[in-house]
Image: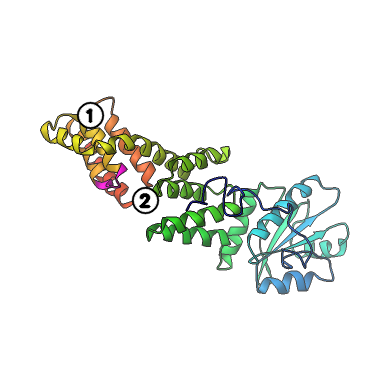
Amino acid sequence: MEDLIIGQTKSGAAPGAPKAGGVPNRSPGGPSGGMIVEGNQKTFMAEVIEASRAVPVLVDFWATWCGPCKQLTPTLEKVVTAAGGRLKLVKIDIDQNRSLVAQLTQLGLPMQSVPTVAAFWQGQIADLFQGALPESDVKRFAEGLLKLAGGQMPSADILAEAKAAVEEGDIEAAGELFSALLQQEPENPDAWGGLIRALLALGQEDQAKQALAQVPPTLAAHAEIAGARAALALAEEGRQAKSQISALQARVAADPADHQARYDYATALNATGQREQAADALLDIVRRDRAWNEDAARLQLLKFFEAWGFDDPATMAARRKLSAILFS
C-alpha cells in the first residue's frame, strides 16, 4: 500500500481533504443528482410529499434576511450530498411562499422561527429541528432519519466494509477503505483510528505517526484516537523489546521474581501480536506484587486494552482475569 501514505493518496490529495469544487452544486442537473432543489407551493406535493415515499426528504425553511440560515443551509447540502442519493433536500424561502407556510402552520408545523428543518418520510413529518445546528448534530439528525427509513449513510457502509476487511486479515484493503472514508468525512474518528492501526499493521510506523499528527484537534480525546495513539506508543516500546524476546524469556524462566524482565517480555509479546500471552505476563506481575513499580503492570495492561480496543476478545478475557485478581 505504497500510495496509502497519510497526506497522499492515489489522487495526490490528503485523505481528509475535501475534493476540488468547493460548495456542492445546487442545481437539479449537477452532482447532487436532483437531490438538492429549490421548492415552492406548486412543487411541494411532488418534491416533498410524493418524493418522501421513496427517500426521506429534509425541508429547509429559510429566509434571505436570516443569518443562521446562511450557516445551516451549506451544512445541510454537505450532509445530503454525502448521503449519495439516500436523502433529498428541498429548500423553501418562507417570504416567497407565505401561503404554503401558513397552510403548514395550520397543520401543526411550528414555524415561529427560521431556520426550521422538517424531515418527511412516507408523506408524513417524521422529525424536525430549529436553529443552526453544528454539522455533527445535523449528521446525527440525518442518520436518525435514514435509520427510521431502514437505511444508513454510505459512510457507514464503507466503515463496515473496512472493519470486515480487518477481520479477514486484508489490512491493505482496509487501509484503502479507511482512507476513502476520510475523503468523505475528514472528522470521522473511526476512520482515522482505523487508518492509523492499518498503517501500523503494515509496518508503516512513520506514516502512522503522520496520520496521528493530522487528526483534527476536536477528535484528540475520542476513544478511537486514544486507542490508536496507545497502539503507536506500544509499537515504539515493543520494537526494541521484540529484538530481545528470547533473552527476556530466559530471564523470566531463570528468575520468576524478575518483574522488570516479565514486564519487558509482555511488551515484546504484544509487539509480535501475542496478545493473550502478553496480558498473562502482566497479570502474573499484578498477581505477585500489585504495587510493583508504582502499579506499572496494571497501567501497562490498561494501555494494552486501549490499544487493542475494549471489545477485542483478548481485552475482555484479560479484564475478567484482572478483576478476579483485584477483587479476590
Kindly identify the residue that appears in the image at 38 percent across and 43 percent down.
Answer: 307
Q: Residue at point 39% right, 49% down?
A: 201
Q: Which residue is mark 1?
A: 260
- In the image, residue 302 sits, relative to residue 54, either above or below, namely above
Q: Earlier in the sequence, mark 1 or mark 2?
A: 1
Which of 207/273 is in front? 207
Q: Is residue 291 left or right of residue 73?
A: left
The residue type indicated by label 2 comes to: Asp
Mark 1 or mark 2, whichever is nearer to me: 1
In the picture, which quadrant includes the C terminus?
top left
Q: Residue at x 30, y 42 (%)?
A: 270
Query: Which residue type carries mark 1?
Result: Gln
Q: Is residue 277 covered in magenta?
A: no
Residue carrying label 2: 311
Residue positioned most to the front: 2
Residue 321 in percent (x, y) is at 23, 44
